Image (cartoon, coloured by chain):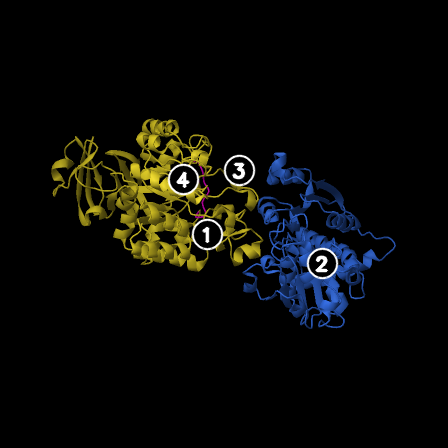
Amino acid sequence: MSILIKGGRIIDPSRNFDKIGNILIEKGKIKSFPKDAKEFENNSKYKVIDAGRKIVSPGFVDIHVHLREPGYEYKETIRSGCESAAAGGFTSIVCMPNTNPINDNASVTEYIMLKARTEGIVNVFPIGAITKGEKGETLAQIGEMYEAGCVGVSDDGMPVMNSKVMRHAMEYVKAFGIPVISHAEDRNLSASGVMNEGDMSTLLGLKGIPAASEDVMVSRDITLAELTGTHLHICHVSTAGSVRLIRDAKARGVNVTAEAAPHHFTLTDKAVGEYDTNSKMNPPLRGESDMEAVREGLRDGTIDVIATDHAPHSEDEKKVEFDLAPFGIVGLETALPLSLRLVEQGVISLHDMIAKMTYIPSKIVNIERGTLNPGAPADVVIFDAERRYTVDRDKFHSKSKNTPFHGWELSGAVICTIVNGRVVYSC
Amino acid sequence: MEFERKHILGLEELNAEEITLVLDTAESMKEVSERDVKKVPALRGMTVCNLFFEPSTRTRSSFEIAEKRLSADVLNFTTSQSSVVKGESLLDTARNLEAMGASMIVIRHPMSGAPWLLAKELNSSIINAGDGSHEHPSQALLDLFTIRRMKGGIEGLKIVIVGDILHSRVARSNIWGFLKLGAEVRVVGPPTLIPKYIEKIDVRTFYNLSEAVVDADVIIMLRIQKERQDFEFFPSLREYSRFYGLTREKIKRAHENVTVMHPGPINRGVELSSDMADGPGSVILEQVSNGIAVRMAMFYLVASARRNG
């Protein structure tokens, strides 16, 4: 069916476009921007969606999601992860390889692609592992995974500690033009740490992860990116040190991009409070000055994109001693309102926020999404930036409910999500 | 003043009046402990469970004696393995004990925050008997009680805590207790064992023992956990002892009536030379006997708060 979105404020940073108007979607593609909606309104061929007083933008693109399938379907499946994405306004998600089995060869990639085609309601783009079994020893089947659909490589939570292996990975991916995506952490420095090392960890008697464990790895990876000329993308930047290092590297012309997660620009380690495992993530929530540096990095463009690091875990896994709880929180369904807070607080403009959630992330993993260009796949989100509501984890579409934002009052609700011209979520 | 807390989880959350109330109550419990018949009916009909996930002889025995002197029914649940190794979660273990009728659970656990998890999810009163590297409130209260008896009060004293501050729950609880009652607190040890952020709390940091003890009224030696040290934090026990072991020589500049304390068990020749451990300033064994009175006071006050609340 063809869709006409009527009278919304259309913001498409990929074309520097910001006007009130109509969008016509036909055959799954953006067709045109008709001046007048009237001729479509009384035509049963068209589904007309009234977007008056709402914002219409390209569907959001999240380049850091954990879908948990195969292997951990009790936390999330490709289907439930896609539903959660759609409810959050995301039309494309890029999923990390730390499934079971790990996505380190084409057969796992193909499984994910197949499941996503049959059960997924948003576009799913997998990331392959850098090394076999994410062990950091020998390169995974990067070329075959690329052919099967992988858009980047990363060992994510198990960063490659051996610098030579990382160098070879960066050199090797040049044949396929995909980025190396780094969860920057020196695992010897963070050892068995469970939260940010600082006054909170000292008081709580919890083992700390120093900011330095991120900084030294960002520094190493930038050095290797400089050596190899490969596109390096740094995940979930959480420290003032890494923001500074990335800023300096960009100024020198190093091919590096970076992302920040909503929880890192919204919360500090104070949120751990009395051992709240829903505030346990890796990298951990940092101190005030780190959070401010991340916000400044988003403002001045050092940090290119917003990505959620959506990491579902079951209630049972989180309702344990803090040390034993797994790292990570769900993020797809709170990303928009938390990012809109940055706009409200004057950190970034609405235009920049949408850019950091649409065409810039698409560019990083080289996918043709995140734009309303005529002819592009019709991935569109309609949201109401003003609508206030209370976050209720029990209403999440994700299988998991691990969020520190339950009960927060936020502004910004997704009204409708359209993927390839099909409405996949509406409220 | 009435004690209104259902749990005793740590000294960070108790205020000076509450701490003083525990210490005052412990005075009358001490008196009970000195009678021929050392038993009162305060907890009669109440079941208290000692849930110990770490090997501990003295703390567990001390709690058990305190419970029995108050006429509680006592259930001991001791395991050196973590609940997860056994396959059952901590929460399920504790819920089972509650279902068996335990109205108070004393928990020692190798992970910081474990008692908070139980306090959030259970109806029983939770008494923290030591959690990870976080707090050990009964030890701190018995230290405060012992010092108050020795020195007549806490305010204005110069108290030095020596050793592994990084991993020590005794140190954290003691620091809160001492600061709230108006003492000056200094910590000393090798820099690898002093958390970088400890000065955010109002304590002074030293790396040299002889300098740290100048004019000190009380010196608390912390145990070096030999079983935990893989000498990542200092080169050898011999070197540790040379720089941070307490000897007559090193405390020359302390107050002449300096009191020496240790939460036990002592590694003789490592933290303390024997002449210091057994010398005139040492109150190490008094700490042990005061522990019972203080724990009786904790139970007594929490039980009254339960009844009233």
- Secondary structure mostly seen in magenta is loop
| Visible residue check, residue A301 | no
* Between marks 1 and 3 in the image, the one whose residue lies nearer the viewer: 1
* Residue A178 drawn at (x, y percent): 31, 39
The residue carrying mark 2 is B271
| Visible residue check, residue A352 | yes
The secondary structure type at the circle numbered 2 is: loop
* Residue A143 drawn at (x, y percent): 33, 32
Badge 2 amino acid: Glu
Numbered tag placed on residue A396 in the rendering: 4
* Between marks 4 and 3 in the image, the one whose residue lies nearer the viewer: 3
Badge 4 amino acid: Phe
The answer to whether residue A403 is magenta is yes
Which tint was used for chain B?
blue
- The quarter holding residue A122 reads top left
Distance (Cα) linking label 4 and label 2: 55 Å
Quadrant including the N terminus of chain B: bottom right
**Are discs 1 and 3 both within one chain?**
yes
Q: Residue furthest right?
A: B36
**Are discs 4 and 1 both within one chain?**
yes
- The quarter holding residue B153 reads bottom right
Report the side of A426 relative to A291 (left or right).
left
Report the side of A20 relative to B233 (left or right).
left
Report the side of B179 relative to A8 (left or right).
right
Q: Chain of mark 2?
A: B
Span highlighted in magenta in the image: A394-405
The residue carrying mark 3 is A316
Numbered tag placed on residue B9 in the rendering: none
Q: Is residue A361 above or below residue A197?
A: above
Badge 3 amino acid: Asp
The residue carrying mark 1 is A285
Q: Residues within 10 Å of mark 1 (few under 14, many from 20)?
A: many
